[in-house]
Every structure is written in C-alpha cells, then in structure tokens.
Amino acid sequence: MKVGVLQFFGWADRNTPLEHVYTRAVERFEIMDDTGYDAVWLAEHHFSSFSVCPSVHMMGTMAAARTKRLRIGTAVSLAAFYNPLRLAEEVALLDVLSGGRVNWGAGRGFSVGEFAAFGIPVEESVERFRETVDVVLKAWAEARVSHEGRYFNLHDVEVLPKPLQAPHPPVWMAATSESAIDWAAGRGFSILMDPHCTQTELSEKRALYGRRLVEAGHVADGRDIPMARLIAVSHSAERAKLVARRGAAWTVGSYIGGLGGARDPVERYVDEVILHGTPASVLDQILALKETASMNYLMCAPLSQESFDLMTLEILPKLV
C-alpha cells in the first residue's frame, strides 16, 4: 500500500504566529521524505483558517526544494478559480522545478464563500471546472493550444514550460458525488476520494467508480486511488478519541458547517469518518479498508502532532 499525507495548514490558535504553521509543515515534508511516504498532498483553501494555503503550487515549490524523493501532490488545485493557461503554466513549472515529481489533483471546490469571494457563480462551477481541466491537458499535450468553449476562447497560444513528465504528470480528479464519479470514470480519470465521507460511503463510492470505469471501456486495474482519511492516533484510545472529537469540531465549525439531518455532525465524524485509536487499532482499521474499500493508497490527514509521529514511527513501516 502506498501512503501519503494530506497536508492541511490549519490555524486553530490565532495567538500562534501563522508562520509557525508553515514551519511545522516544512519540517513534516522533510520527515516524510526520509521515512517512506510516497507523497505529500497539499490542500488548497481560501479565506478560512481551516487551512491557510491559498497556493498549493507555491507551497509545492517549497516542498520540492526541501525534499529529494517525495512526490508533490495537489489535493487539489481548485481549477474552477483559475484561468486554465495560468494553471497549466504553474503546474508545469512546479513539475520542472521538482525534477518531475508532481501528482496533479484537480477539483471543483464546494465552499460557497470561496465562490462568492472570487465572483464565480456556484451554478457555473461544474462546467467551468471541467472546461479548465480540458484546456490544461491540451496546453500540455499540444505545441500551441487553441480552444473554443463556453468560458474560454484561445487561439494558437504557446504555453511554456511543458511538464517534465511525459506526456504530463499523473492526473487525478476529486470526485465525491455520483455525478462527479460518473464523469471522471467516463473520461478515464483516476480519482481522489474525500476525507469527509464515512467508511461505508468510501467503500460504496469506490465500488461505483470501478463499475463505471469498466462500463466506459477503461482499464480499472493498476490504478492508484488515494483515499483521504482523517486520523487520530495515541497510545491511549481515550486520548485518541478526544483528539478525533476536537478535530471533528474544528472541521465542522470552521469549514464544513452543518451537514443537515438529525445526526450531530461532530458525532458522525467521530463514529464513522475519523480513524482513531491506538497504533495497533488504527492499523487494523486501515487494513480493514484495504479489504472493504479496495484501498491501495492511504492519504492520511493526521489531526495532531502526536498522530503524525505515531503514524510515521509505528504504522507506516507496517504498510509500505
């Protein structure tokens, strides 16, 4: 199993200087590089202390400069917010500067506040996202790109640099809803699976994606499908559950908001979403998902420094 880290840049305590958030992240990049993680996946968010990383491509350059073998993933480039030519340039430049270590993950985004601040109607987001992805891939594949679409019209533009990886970096699409899974599978894209669905939902969505790939005539075997999971680990199961509850409350309160229904969303995260417990218990939960969800790539999001340390020292060696 491959293991990567979904790196958020949460700023929960505003009495702590923001630069400390970035310093800690860079230290983690170096540890990941030395201990066998496959990749760091950088989370792009805007206008929220949930994760203060508005440019995964700029942060990716820092990660590349401080590591030698670690792959640099975007989870995700929020493609609906970009001019596709600029996005193609930035990701290609990161690939060149990193020595061909980019994993490109793209997504639509779902925060209403982000769309409002950027002046992009939410109802346009799906088509704008998909058209942007099409243009990026054309810009990498063609010497000069022309495109006529709903949102972008381009004529004979030479996009430089081209990515170092040929024909381009490996590509994933974030896909959570059934319609997004259908589109990604129909186009033959591999997918990134989100950290907010339950373990049962994760299994169901993975099975749906596999069926849709085959129905569309694409090869399903041999794909890395990163599955993002929030993780709380401690030598005490009780402490791990407290970390999980604190992480769930932070996630719900600062970014996700209420999920509707009668169920307390924090309890939902603790009971059905977050992997938490002792190192042995969390390892068992991961191995269970390997069977029930066909997990071949864990994208872990540790909810505390202790969780990251124990994941690295006690769980990672048993998985890779």
Image (cartoon, rainbow, N blue to C red):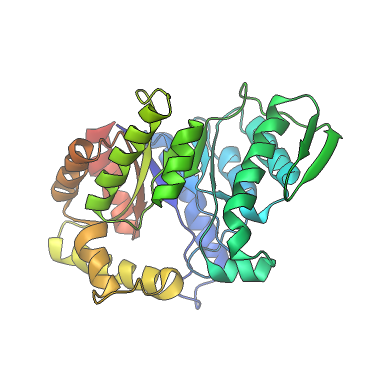
Check the image and report above or below for 58 versus 241. Answer: above
Q: Is residue 188 visible in this depiction of the protein? A: yes
The one nearer the camera, 86 or 303, is 86
Q: Quadrant of the N terminus?
A: top left
Residue situated in front as seen by the camera: 291 or 99: 291
Q: Residue at x 58, y 38 (%)?
A: 64
Is 239 on the left or on the right of 47, as rendered? left
Residue 80 coordinates in the image, percent (x, y) = 63, 53
Name which residue lies at 30% across and 33% down.
296
Residue at left offset 36%, top offset 26%: 220
Q: Nearer the viewer, residue 5 or 160?
A: 160
Quarter of the C terminus within the rendering: top left
| Image coordinates for residue 232, horizontal then vertical, percent | 26, 58
Q: Position of residue 56 (x, y in %)?
A: 59, 50
Question: Residue lying furthest front in this view?
Answer: 215
| Residue 263 vertical placement versus 166 (above, below) | below
Q: Please give left or right for residue 246 compared with residue 68 in the image.
A: left
The quadrant where residue 207 appears: top left
Picture mark count: 0
Give the percent coordinates (x, y) of residue 21: 51, 62
